[in-house]
Structure formats: C-alpha cells, structure tokens
Amino acid sequence: METKAFQKIYTSITQITKATCSLNAEGVGYEELASVNGRLAQVVKIQGQNVTLQVFGGTEGIPSNAEVTFYGRPPVLKVSDDLAGRFFNSFGLPIDGGPEVEGDEREIGGPSVNPVRRKQPSELIATGIAGIDLNNTLVTGQKIPFFADPDQPFNQVMAMVALRAKADKIILGGMGLTNDDYLYFKNIFDSAGALDRIVSFVNTTEDPPVERLLVPDMALTAAEYFAVDRNENVLVLLTDMTLYADALSIVSNRMDQIPSKDSMPGSLYSDLAKLYEKAVQFPEGGSITIIAVTTLSGGDITHAIPDNTGYITEGQLFLRRDTEIGKVIVDPFRSLSRLKQLVIGKKTREDHPQVMNTAVRLYADAANARTKLENGFDLTDYDERTLKFAKEYSDRLLAIDVNIDTDTMLNTGWELFSENFTQAEVGIRKEMTDKYWPRKK
Amino acid sequence: MKENNLTRGKVTGVIANLVMVDVDGPVSQNEICYINLEGVKLMAEVIKVFEKRAYIQVFESTRGLKVGTEVEFTKGMLEVTLGPGILSRNYDGLQHDLNKMDGVFLKRGDYTSALDDKKKWSFKPLAKKGDTVAAGDWLGEVNENEQPHKIMVPFKFEGRYKIKSVVSEGEYTVNDTIAVLTDQKDNEVPVTMVQKWPVKVPIKTYKNKPRPFKLLETGVRTMDTLNPIVEGGTGFIPGPFGSGKTVLQHAISKQAEADIVVVAACGERANEVVEIFAEFPEIEDPRTGRKLMERTTIIANTSNMPVAAREASVYTAMTIAEYYRAMGLKILLLADSTSRWAQALREMSNRMEELPGPDAFPMDLPAIISNFYSRAGFVYLNNGETGSITFIGTVSPAGGNLKEPVTESTKKAARCFYALSQQRADSKRYPAIDPIDSYSKYIEYPELQDYMKENISDTWVDNVMLVKNILIRGKEASEQINILGDDGVPISYHVDFWKSEVIDFIILQQDAFDPIDRSCPIPRQKYMLEKVLDVYDTSFEFESFEEVNPYFKRIINELKQMNYSEYESEQFKRHEKELYYIIDEKKSA
Ligand SMILES: Nc1ncnc2c1ncn2[C@@H]1O[C@H](COP(=O)(O)OP(=O)(O)OP(=O)(O)O)[C@@H](O)[C@H]1O
Ligand SMILES: [Mg+2]
C-alpha cells in the first residue's frame, strides 16, 4: 500500500504502550490508516493535537522517533473477481506468491444494510449432517457459530459444511489459525477442486494478534462485493472469533477503558454485532451467510465472549463427544438454529417440525433416565426404551459423520419412534402419525 | 462569527462516537447539533458541558472526522414529529423513515422526513369556533388506517386558548392550517396536523392516571391465565439468549388486544425486524379483519445501527405511544432489548470516564429505567375518555444471571415479571416462562380481580390460585422423587407430579408456530383450564407407580390434540370425549 506523495512525516512519538502509540499531528481523520516505521496502524482516538494509533503489528521495538505517516483514508480492500482463489494476510496483501489484486477500492467496515432493503431469509442450506439439517436447519443469510472446546474438530466440520453448502463463494477469515489448520483448509479446498470459489484472509498464530482485528472486516468486504455486485451466495467462515475478541480486549485495555465482564471492553456486544449483522439475504438473490467458531474455555458459555455472541447470532451449534457411541455429535440440547422455522415444514416435508421436536424431547427423557441410573435408582420400562432410542438416535442421526438427505432423516426418525414407543407416548399430531407412522412389517 | 444567534463550535477530539467540541456560545444539555463532515451533516446530542467544551454523542459513525470540523447547534432537543401517517411506517431510532432512504446501505446523514407531506387526509372537525381548549384537546380527526386519528391542540401550548376558526370537513395535508386559536393575549396561533415533541419529556395532557384494572388479553395462556398483564400495565421479560424473548414479544404484538402496537427493535437482530416487515402486512388482526401492519409502527435501531441512537429509539417509541394514547387509544409498546439501551449508556459513560456503578453501568441507571417505565399507564383524558400504554420490555442479562444491574433495576420498575428459564427452553417447554418464579402484581389488585370475576367467571381467580398451588406441589413432588427414587415415594407423589405436568403441557406450553395453538382467546383459556382442573379433581387408582406416567401421557396427548384443533370443532370434541373415556378408566369408584 503506497502512501501519498505530499504527505507529512512525523518523528516524535509521545507515548508508547503494547498495542498503541500517541503523537502530535494535524489534519488527521478518525479511523484513518497510518504507518509507524512501516507498520500499519489506525487512528483510535483524537484529543486536540494528540492522536492515538493502534499499531496492528504491535509496538515492540518502536522507537520514540519512529517515522509516522498518514494515508488520508481508512483501511481498504481492492475488490474484483480476481479475489477468487487467492490467499491474503490481514491487510489484504497476497501471501500465495501471486500478484496484488486490481479492482475497486472499498473501505472495510463500511455501512450497514438498511433493514427495509433486506429480504427475509428463506433458502435452506443442506449439509447432509442430520444434527444440522434435521434439528438446526441453516438458512442463507443466517449467522451462526460453532461453540466448541478447543480440542474439538470444529474446523473440520466447518470445512465439510462449507463444501457441501453449494455456495458460489466461500470466504475464509482465519484469526490466530495454527499453521496446520491453515494448511488443512488449503488442502481440503484444493482436493475438493473448490479453490477457485475460495477467498482467504488469514492471520496465523505466527502473526501479531492485533492484526486479527482486520480479518473479519476484510472477509466481509470481499463477501459484500460478491453478494451485492455479483448477486452471489457467499458463505463466510470466521474462525476463531474468541481470538478476535481477545485482540479487542488487548487494545481497549491499553487505552485505559474500564473493562466490563471478563476484562472484555464494554462495547463487545456492538463490536461483534457489527460483524455478524453483515449476514444478509438480498432481494436480488445475493446473500451472505456467516458460520463462525467461538471456542469456549472449559465449556463455559456464560463467559462474555460466547454470551455476547449468543445474543447476536441466530443460534449456535454445539459439538460434543458422545462417549456411548464414540463419535462427535451435534448436541441437540444446546444447539439451536433460530431461522429454521422459516424453512422446516415449508421447504422440507410437513412432518419435519414435529419429528424434530419429538425426538429431542425423547432424548431429554433419556437424559433423565441416565441421571436416575447414575443415582442408583431402578429404571422403568419407559426409561429403558428412551435409553435405547437415545443411543440409536445419536448414532444414526446426531453423529457428524452422517450424510443423508432430509427425507431420509425424517424417515429414520419415524422408524426410531415406532420401534421404541407407542403413538400416545410420542404425542405427535394425529394427522401426521396417520400418514407417517411406519406400518408393522 | 455568529449567525441567527445559533451557537457554533469546532471539533477538538474524537473517541468513537464521543466527540468534544469547543463552542462559541451557550449550549444546553441534550441539545441537538450537526457536525458538518465535508458537506454531510451528522446529527449529535450534547451529553455533558464543561466550561466552553461540549461533549456530544454522535448518532452516526465518526469515521474521517477531523479536529477543527464545524458544528452547528440547534437550540432544540431531540424531537419527534407527530401527525397522521405514523402507522405502518418503519423508522430508525431518530424517526427517519427507512423506506424513503435510497440505496441498499444506510448512508450517514440521510435524514428522511417522518411523515408524508403530500398526502391528503379527510379531516372532520370535532371542536367548533368559540370553544375553549388546552394542550391535548381534540380539534378534529382524520381516518388513519381506519383508526380515528385525533388532531389535537399541540402539547407545547401552555394555558387556555379559544378557537377562532376550524376548517370544515375536507381534504387537507398535514401542513395545512386546520384551526386558528387565540391565546389569552388575543394572539392568533395557527394549528396544523403536525406537531413536535422532545422525546425525553413525558406527554402529560391527561387528567389522571388511576391504577390499571382491565385485563389486556394477549392470547398467551401462561400470561393471561397465570400472570396477567393489564391495559396500561408494565412488564418485562428477562432471559438468557435463545430462551424465547423475541418469539414471545412477537406473539404478543400479533395477538394482543390493542388498537396500536409500537415495536422498538433496540440493538437486536435486523432479521427479526425483517420478519415483522414480511409477516405483518400479511397477517390479519382477527378482531378488525385488517392487516396487522396497519396498526403497527416499527422503530428499528438494530445492533449494527449507530449505538447512540439506541437510547433515542426507545424514547422515540414511547413518545409516539403517548401521542396515540392522548387520542384515547389502547397502545401496546414493546422494546427488545432494553439491555442494549443500557449498554449504549454504559459505552458512553465509559468513554466519558465517569465513575462507574455496578458492572460499569452508569450510576443513575435505576433512575433512568424507572422513569421510562413510569411513562406507561392507563389514563383518563380531560374529556373523560380513556387511553393506555402497556409496556413490555425484554432484558438480556449477561451470562443469563438475573443478579445484574439491568434486571434488578427493571424489577423495581415493572409490575409483571416473566422470567424465562434456560432449563425450560432447553427442554423445549415454550414459552419458557417459569411459572413459579414469575409474577404479576396486578393479580393482587382487587380492581382486576373484580374485573375478571365479572368478565371471565366467578371462580376464575380462585382457579388461577389453585393452579399455581398445583404447580408448586408438583415441583415438590418431583424433587422428592428425584431424591428418593421412583419407588421410594408413595404413588400419590407421582400423581401429584403428573397432575402438574398436565397443567404444564396444556396451559403453560404453547406452540408459537402452530396456526391454531399460537393464539388462545380467553373463553378457550377458561375452557381448557376447566378441563385440566377436571383431571386434577379426579382421584385415580393405580396399582403401581409404573402405570402413572404412561396413563397421564395419554391424558396429555388428548388435551394437546384439543389445543391443536379448531375450538369447538368436531375434532376438538372427539378428543374431549376420548379424554373422558381415559379419565374413567382409572377413576376411583
Ligand atoms: N413459543 C415458542 N414456540 C416454539 N419455539 C420457540 C418459542 N419460543 C422460542 N422458541 C425457539 O427458541 C428460539 C429462540 O427464541 P428467541 O429468538 O425468542 O430468543 P431470545 O430470548 O429473544 O434470544 P436473544 O436474547 O438471543 O435474542 C426461536 O428461534 C425458536 O426456535
Ligand atoms: Mg431476541
């Protein structure tokens, strides 16, 4: 990124902290981009002459006489169809050895869509995973994170979902990605022959953490180009948003802001919402769907990061290892897709809502039975049957290695009901049981 | 330097949407000003003044703003524009019409007008020459979406006025003069159909505000039957994310027996507002046969819209509600979520480096919340007519923990508490309102009890109290069973538990997405309550505890099928009959 020719060079920094530095400068715009000894930085505070910069690469080794220049504009991304198939760093510069992309310059973190110009999401995204399609159906224009412990295979599941989702473009925003995971994504997209549909912005664990703050905005700016200018269905993958939020707290704590819960900035909700709300269905057909990852620490969802995320996103997907069947499943209790109502029973078979709810309720009964068992109580005949049901349900429907279409999922559900329960125990609307209850062979 | 006596200033600092301005004249707290950012005017509000420096919160992104940028002050506070044509509109938090804005993306400084100034309204005078009038008195009415929309003496008019003239029945635009009044000093003042009012100031043109006493029917069983809200009442819905706050509010907004519904989408998801945009123009109001959108106004400041306008959005909504209440209408005001508004206050107080209160919220948060809730209420207008604003807000407690400042402050201000429980939501027992923790203070009001006895049935209040007891007893029984084991307790414990489960499944749970079950009118609620009490009143005989669960499941199944059937239809009656066969099977002799 070259700077303007007539620009002024400042050389006297007045204050340096871990993530920011301050200096006296004139004519500087808020959120403007700057360079501090070649490191990119952004204006985060102006007080009279005094300007505070957030230095993305960190301030290690920055001397008080570092050269500071201002770009006269906020960070931008050049957008065009040439983005496709390319890998970039947090600043939108190629890391794949290819040339810089030419195109229209767009400010990142730009304005929001007018809510009256949105369309209600209504296109189902089929993934073949019953834990998702049956219980937590995804819809284009939705934003939903995986809530997962760091040791769970969330990146693998996310890549699988992305590849099956039939999106026109997949945009990967990697924040604090390990090099291995970065190569994993590269590899799996490559071997699926999908590289030409992928755009990646990657900050790895080897890069400075504050740089991550640019990644989601870069990814979403590229997404808006394809969704608005090209009317494409774009799927944005953001992993790991917990590391993004950690970077936010580094900067805000350096700026002496009073932290709120879990030392996160008080603006965490707004900061995250601004990103996630970029998910949208446009009336012209283009859409942006966001699937993110929020890693939990010790499964604690009351921590400020997952908590605020849950309040923003349209549901969440929980992965859990089911020790009984030895597989990872999509947990039906804590997982939820808020937009499923818009498609289930409408774009899918009419019995979908009832089969889904009933199966989860019976699975809950099984959980109660298991508690009884653990507390050393005898089980009733009904308890025994719920346990048998739960095991098969987990194995044949919830496990992430399931890959079937929705009708098959529903038929499997009815089979499991009829094998283990009476119609009254299942309690589904009579019109439905009359039609779908499997006949005795 | 100064023109028209208006104060001007220059930007001296920027921290996100907090901007410091050095001014050349007087400024007042909450005064509105405009920052001239390269020709685009950004609206802002003064939130603190220190000597010659004004601290302003900008209702827009401040990207690109520089020191030295000019600021113009307006002398006015944040005001809304009141007049016919507010219904069916979609506004942003500052009452700009979202539909009038160009383009897919919101543009800074794109301030569209709230009303349509070309449209002609057919005006009918209600007052005549020579009448003495005061602020809020009705001069005439126009037909706004088949509702009588009163044109009133502007609320800002102080003292008494005499009507010099009123135009005759005919078609007028909002800016046409429809009456001329004279004040005590014989000055003539023209009145149009539009007036402005500062949002932070309550409109108090009513005679008095008695305790509310009329049930407001919402069609949600667990509210109407167990913890009813009243016309002019206040309530709030706290709950962790995903527990059903928005779905419940949407259900109430569709079904409640209100003349007008004002929805403030405050810092929540855009897709949820889009759902209203998409559905309300299609859904019919069963009582009027007209589309829901015709009685609804939406104030949308979704979470990606400017944070400072979030606070304004709830006040804008409240002021619009007060305007319609002064016309003698029943208003339902909903805000989702009031926590986002409190967070916006927190962000700002944080940037201003104010001394923080609990959880870094501003110290005066409880006062702000209780002032806001106090603007709701049932009123008698000066002409003897009544009007009401029923307000229900949601609260999004951090980590789902109700011991946090917004929930605690709201609990002091609101009279109904609808606590959504994570556990109920997890087991899909929707709506997840906890029947035991939740309360309605109104149910203790003798005025309301009398009203319900008269309008529902003599035994209604007693039955409701009985149901609450059954639920508590059921909970105790279930705890005992969990501690002592299924066979460690008498069979009667199982029966008590399952009798409460019948109430849970049939009265408390309600499928918001089922075309029939989603709305349950009072007569049907009464009928179903009698059915479950029939079950309760029956004494059953069981050989062993193992029989209890499957037996009650059958009872619940029949009753549930009744909930899913058209009221009093063949199907409904068939299941009812079946229910009594099942009851007879185990009824003790
Ligand atoms: N009455 C109901 N009937 C059926 N499903 C419901 C009901 N209430 C809630 N749900 C389910 O729960 C989901 C979440 O509900 P909702 O969006 O109202 O939660 P919320 O409390 O507003 O969450 P947030 O605080 O994140 O906005 C819905 O998408 C729906 O799947
Ligand atoms: Mg909600």
Image (tube, rainbow, N blue to C red):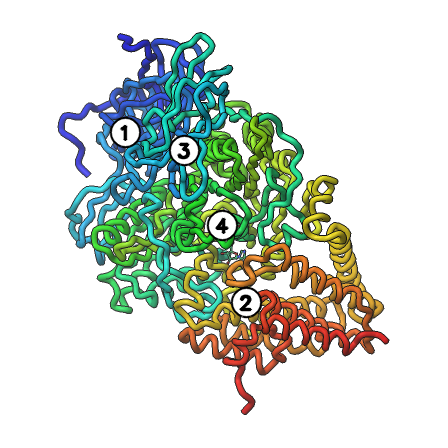
Q: Nearer the viewer, mark 4 or mark 3?
A: 3
Disc 4 residue: CB within 8 Å of ligand 1: yes
In what quadrant of the picture does the C terminus of chain A appear? bottom right
Q: Is residue B427 above or below residue B181?
A: below
Residue A267: image location, x then y, percent:
45, 36
Q: Please tell me if label 1 and label 4 are on a single chain.
A: no
Residue B224: image location, x then y, percent:
64, 51
Q: Dots 2 and 4: beta carbons under 8 Å?
A: no
Disc 4 secondary structure class: helix
Residue A357: image tag: 2
Q: Nearer the viewer, mark 2 or mark 1?
A: 2
Question: Which of A408/A184 is in front?
Answer: A408
Q: Amino acid at mark 4?
A: Gly
Q: Is residue B133 above or below residue A332?
A: above
Q: Mark 3 belongs to which subunit?
A: B
Q: Which residue is mark 4?
A: A310
Label 1, residues with CA under 10 Å away: few <14, some 14-19, many ≥20:
some
Q: Which residue is mark 1?
A: B64
Picture quadrant of residue B561: bottom right
